[in-house]
Amino acid sequence: MKLLSLFFLAVVLLMSCTKDQTPGKASIEGTWKLVKVYDGGLPYLSQPYGDVIITFTTAGTYSGHTIANEFSNGTFKVQDSNKVTFDLPQIQSQVNEEEWGRSLFVVLGSCGLQSVFPCKPCNYTVTGDELFIDSPMRYDILLKKQ
């Protein structure tokens, strides 16, 4: 009887344990605001004087605006292990871009700026309401979900 009781206790304990859940690939879809730019891994810009907004869709396109310009019809492709590549968008105006916009477009254009084929994708991490994009180029960016 003791052996049977121990067996049932072991079964109940095993059933109450949950398997460690490995989080899946976090989604970048949604609307994000640029809040910080890193240059070579060090903080570069952290006090925006206007909104820089980008919206990623489930269809693999993105659009938004910088402080000076609007952009649309950009495309992105999420790859395995939280990697993403971007194709540059169409910019609706010809106003010279300020630092925040230039930094964003360097990250979004990183695939076309590289001298290797295929290009090295950006790494991205979503933590809570923050999206960090680590570019193989000079700048990395931190965005906050809107």
Image: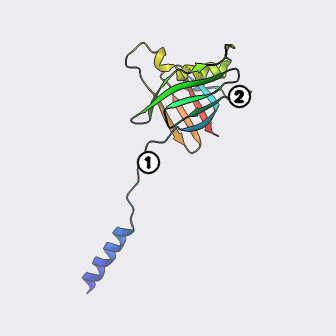
Count of numbered labels shown in the rendering: 2
Task: For mark 2, give the secondary structure.
Answer: loop
Q: Quadrant of residue 30?
A: top right
| Residue 13 image position (x, y, % from top left) | 36, 71
Please determine whether, in this image, residue 136 is positioned above or below residue 22. Answer: above
Choose between 4 and 32: the one closer to the eye.
32
Determine whether the residue tagged by mark 1 lies in a helix, strand or loop. Answer: loop
Residue 29: horizontal and vertical position, in percent? 53, 38
Callout 2, which amino acid?
Pro
Find the residue positioned furthest to the right: 49
Q: Residue at x 48, y 28 (%)?
A: 76
Residue displayed at 47% across by 22% down: 136
Direction from residue 25 to residue 57 in the image, left or right? right
Q: Of label 2 and label 1, which has the lower sequence position?
A: 1
Q: Residues within 10 Å of mark 2 (few under 14, many from 20)?
A: some
Which amino acid, mark 1?
Pro
- Alpha carbons under labels 2 and 1: distance apart: 32 Å
Q: Which residue is mark 1?
A: 23
